[in-house]
Amino acid sequence: MSKSMIEVPAPSVPPDNENRHLLCQMAIEIPLQGIIEAAVKAGWEETEVLTAIIEVADNLVLAHGSNAELDALLKALKRNLE
């Protein structure tokens, strides 16, 4: 099985721009639609694909938050040990 590289446009505005979140959604929409179409073509029902995407995204957010908390704790521990 080969993995193809999905192209997502780079941000066109700085991180503090009020439209950046919306622009990110627009940037990933077409590649995400491609993933959905590929999964449906492989035999998955569209509703289960969409549900799976939501759950995977939720798990990634939770993992990201846990990693950020762990990084903060490790930095605090390192400061206390110095």
Image: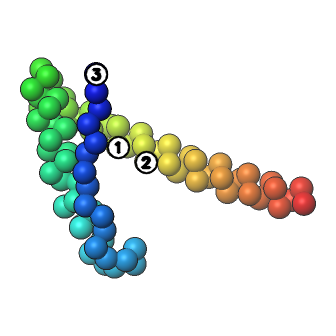
**What residue did someone put label 1 on?**
57
**Disc 1 marks which amino acid?**
Ala
* Residue 63: percent from left, percent from top: 50, 43
**Disc 3 marks which amino acid?**
Met
**Rendered-image quadrant of the C terminus:** bottom right
**What residue did someone put label 3 on?**
1
Dot 2 or dot 3, earlier in sequence: 3
* Residue 43: percent from left, percent from top: 12, 20
Q: Quadrant of the rendered structure where residue 16 is?
A: bottom left
Residue at point 73%, 51% (across, down): 74
Up-down relation of residue 32 to residue 10 (above or below): above
* Residue 44: percent from left, percent from top: 15, 23
Q: CA distance from mark 2 to mark 1?
A: 6 Å
**What residue did someone put label 2 on?**
61
Up-down relation of residue 48 to residue 21 (above or below): above
SS state under label 3: loop
**68 sits to left or right of 60:** right
SS state under label 1: helix
Q: Quadrant of the rendered structure where residue 13 is?
A: bottom left
**Disc 2 marks which amino acid?**
Val
